Image (spheres, rainbow, N blue to C red):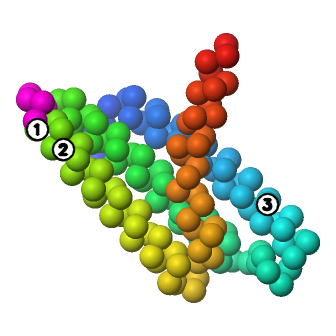
Amino acid sequence: MSSVMDNVQPAVKKETQRVAAITGIGLILMWIIFGVLHGFMPQKVPLDYTVFLGGAAGGCVAVLNFFFMGLAVQKAAAATDEDTARMRIKASYSQRMLLQMLWVVVAIVAPCFHFVAGIVPLLFPGTGIKIAGIFHNKK
């Protein structure tokens, strides 16, 4: 019996784990900021289950988005012609954007999620990779 992860290249697994760690750090920082803001403005900034649930779900969507991108790049690299590879990347981009847009709608509409806490984590992977790149290049 083979696992879904058996066909995933080690580089995709490694980078997805790195992005998951970056997203986890971002979530913790976001929750701390929510806590501080809640201390100063308890009527305007909540600190309840909706903040934690929205953040956790948004973080999962962000990491899944990165993982799906890695799979698309892996499949595009294995393609024999350039047009097929380009088409796979475009299709993947469209599907991943749709996934994120659907999540944003759910985060805004569903009362069990705080919409800011659900949407902000989508920014963590890209921001974290850029910050890590700045510190990595200085070595």
Q: Residue 134 at x, y = what percent?
A: 63, 26
- From this viewpoint, which residue is outermost toward the right? 40
Q: CA distance from mark 3 to mark 1?
A: 45 Å
The residue type indicated by label 2 comes to: Arg
Q: Give the quarter of the image for residue 139.
A: top right
The part of the chain drawn in magenta is 79-83
Q: Main secondary structure of the magenta part?
A: loop
**Residue behind mark 1:** 84
Circles 2 and 3: CB distance less than 8 Å? no
Look at the image and say whether residue 102 sits in the magenta stretch. no
**Residue behind mark 3:** 33
Q: CA distance from mark 2 to mark 3?
A: 39 Å
7 vs 24, left or right, is left
The number of discs equals: 3
Circles 1 and 2: CB distance less than 8 Å? yes
The residue type indicated by label 1 comes to: Thr
Q: Residues within 10 Å of mark 2 (few under 14, many from 20)?
A: some
**Residue behind mark 2:** 88
